[in-house]
Amino acid sequence: MAIKTEPILLNLGPIHPSTHGVFRMRALVDGEVITDIEPVFGYLHRGIEKLAEQKSYRQFIPLTDRLDYVASMNNNLAYVTAVEKLAGIEVPERAEYIRVIMSEIQRIISHLLGIGSFFNDMGTFFTPFFYMFIQKEKLTDLLEMVSGQRLLFNYMRFGGVSHDLPDEFLPALNTFLKEMPAEIDKYERLLKENEIVLARSKKVGILSPDMAINSSASGPVLRASGIEWDIRKADPYSIYDRFDFDIPTGTVGDCYDRYRVRVEELRQSIRILEQAVAGIPKGKVLNPVPLRFRPPEGEVYSHIESNKGELGFHVISDGSDKPYRLHIRAPSLLNLTALRKMLTGWKIADAIIIFGSIDICVGEVDR
């Protein structure tokens, strides 16, 4: 006998821990099944694009840290690369290597937190999360060694980086690179074939290749759907064309594939770091730029393969010392585009896992 039910409007967030920050989902549920969902943004909106118009080009660098604050260096890199392209600023060879090293360290940090949080959402109650957090903290120690900060680094500059690496940095990084593969193997033994993980993530929240492309998804979310697209290879920037690495992809586009792609990207980042450390040259790390320099009139779009996908900056210059207009293409926001289709028809408990598998940072969503 069928039970007659009434649809209920259920709020998930904006302060629920499973929403990964101040993010809200208004779900219409029939019993436990989600029939429709509306993502609600804006709880962390700071108007950062408008603030850029009130700051000099250099003054805006620290504000980029506040976008995806899990990987602040990558935000710095995407912005300074765009302005350098606009103004024709050259970057010293050693600084390019340092930028790649920082970018890949941030990718590992982000993926460790993303994977750990994903399993937390699944109910593992912090065991995998803390295993990964231990390694994340070792890398944060390295970034603190370089910048003096542990979250918002403000390290990149137009024409290079603010200062050179301390003498103890590369030996400490080499020690980490030797230890980390065994740590990843430990994660794999714990999680890869776990029957609960398989039951709750395989064929759950499938994002088809067509839907991924039409939703402008990027990063691990796109690659998990089988699309081999990585800006580091498709449109190389900095010196990424010098490094040998693979682009991991999935086959189904489900939660499990999104988890697997991030694990394999940990290994690829280690490969890149090993090559960068081995090849880093001596020399200066900054070509000085005037404090309030004025790029020529014009506009530019520049993008990088950030930890969560394509992070782009569209900068328009009117010849003054402030951007006339600046727009940020934030991967976390666009990766949420298909959320409604991914969640509809699944149960509330599944919704938490599907949403967690996208791995967003709300600071980048709302801006």
Image (spheres, helix red, strand yellow):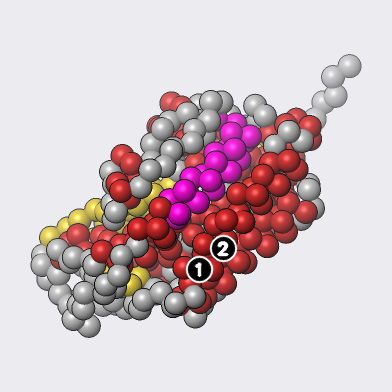
The residue under label 2 is: 175
Which region of the structure is painted magenta?
253-274
Nearer-the-camera pick, 103 or 22: 103
Amino acid type shown at disc 1? Pro
Residue 302 visible in this rendered orientation of the protein: yes
> Which residue: 67% across, 56% down?
132
Nearer-the-camera pick, 107 or 255: 107
Callout 1 crowding tier (Cα within 10 Å): few <14, some 14–19, many ≥20: few
* Left or right of residue 146: residue 183: right
> How many circles with numbers are drawn on the protein?
2
**Which quadrant would the N terminus be assigned to in this image?**
top right
| Quarter residue 90 falls in | bottom left
Residue 45 % position (x, y): 48, 64
> Which residue: 79% across, 32% down?
195
Residue 32 visible in this rendered orientation of the protein: no
Give the CA separation, mark 1 to mark 2.
6 Å
Residue 239 % position (x, y): 29, 53
Compared to residue 116, the image places residue 149 above or below, namely: below
The residue under label 1 is: 171
